[in-house]
Amino acid sequence: MDDRLFRNAMGTFATGVTVITTEAEGEVHGMTANAFMSVSLDPKLVVISIKENARILSKIQESKTFAVNILSDEQQEESMIFAGQIKEKRKVAFGRLSGQPVVPGALAQITCEVSAEHVEGDHTLFIGKVTDIHLEDGNPLLFYKGRYRSLAEEKEVVSK
Ligand code: FAD
Ligand code: NAD
């Protein structure tokens, strides 16, 4: 099957945008990701999917921790920085939650310990046991059909 057909199909599934952060050997690394899902409530588990050639992969394997930062619609620039869509190096200031690096201003900062790792095709799935959460008000940054979007005003539901 053609890659473009697969990507076009997956692109019709509108998602939020996250930046995954981790710290290894004293250095913080971030990567933009939309392959994120809530897995279990008891215990509290999430999953992320990281491609085999991503630099963050070995860093998460080393630190055994990561944070999921769900971006607001004011953070498209952060998404572009951590997806390598802005070429020049930018200095990014990170915050801390339970000692782990997080992206300030994210709608949700979710710190995790890696509880399992599964290689599937050209990606590695990391199951994260949630250790802490911080929430902020705002609206989400969205990704749909390969483009960044934001929520339209809520339409009034007219009952018949
Ligand atoms: P690098 O290429 O090393 O890092 C990515 C960028 O972040 C670089 O430009 C780097 O300079 C910058 N950066 C990293 N750390 C810092 C720091 N401390 N300070 C300043 N800048 C820093 N890929 C997946 O594997 N899974 C996904 O779910 C996924 N979803 C995506 C969703 C969207 C909307 C987009 C746009 C991309 C997605 N990608 C995903 C692709 C992925 O974000 C890119 O391929 C990314 O460049 C790979 O990152 P890397 O770990 O190889 O790191
Ligand atoms: P796109 O049309 O490539 O992405 C549409 C959808 O296809 C994505 O939301 C994702 O669900 C899926 N997809 C894209 N690349 C994939 C991959 N390598 N593995 C698994 N699923 C993938 O949109 P775009 O604007 O061209 O994307 C920007 C860049 O970000 C591209 O380089 C793309 O490969 C990458 N990306 C990677 C993933 C991922 O690895 N899971 C997810 C989204 C975007």
Image (tube, rainbow, N blue to C red):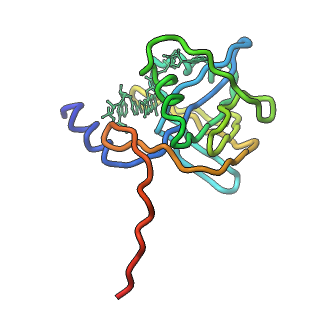
Residue at the extreme bottom of the image, as rendered: 160
Residue beneath the point at 76% across and 30% down: 96
- From what the image shows, is residue 28 above or below residue 114? above
Query: In the figure, residue 63 lies in which quadrant?
Result: top right
Q: The N terminus lies in which quarter of the figure?
A: top left
Residue beneath the point at 38% across and 85% down: 159
Query: In the figure, residue 11 lies in which quadrant?
Result: top left
Q: The C terminus lies in which quarter of the figure?
A: bottom left
- From what the image shows, is residue 136 above or below residue 18? below
Residue beneath the point at 53% across and 25% down: 31
Residue 131: horizontal and vertical position, in percent? Answer: 75, 41
Between residues 105 and 29, which one lies in front from this camera angle?
105
Residue 102: horizontal and vertical position, in percent? Answer: 68, 31
Relative side of 49 to 149, left or right: right
Relative side of 26 to 32, left or right: right
Residue at the extreme right of the image, as rendered: 98
Residue 146: horizontal and vertical position, in percent? Answer: 33, 37
Between residues 79 and 98, which one lies in front from this camera angle?
79
Residue 13: horizontal and vertical position, in percent? Answer: 36, 49
Quadrant assignment for ligand 2: top left
Relative side of 147 to 150, left or right: left
**How many numbered discs?**
0
Query: In the figure, residue 97 lies in which quadrant?
Result: top right
Residue beneath the point at 72% across and 45% down: 133
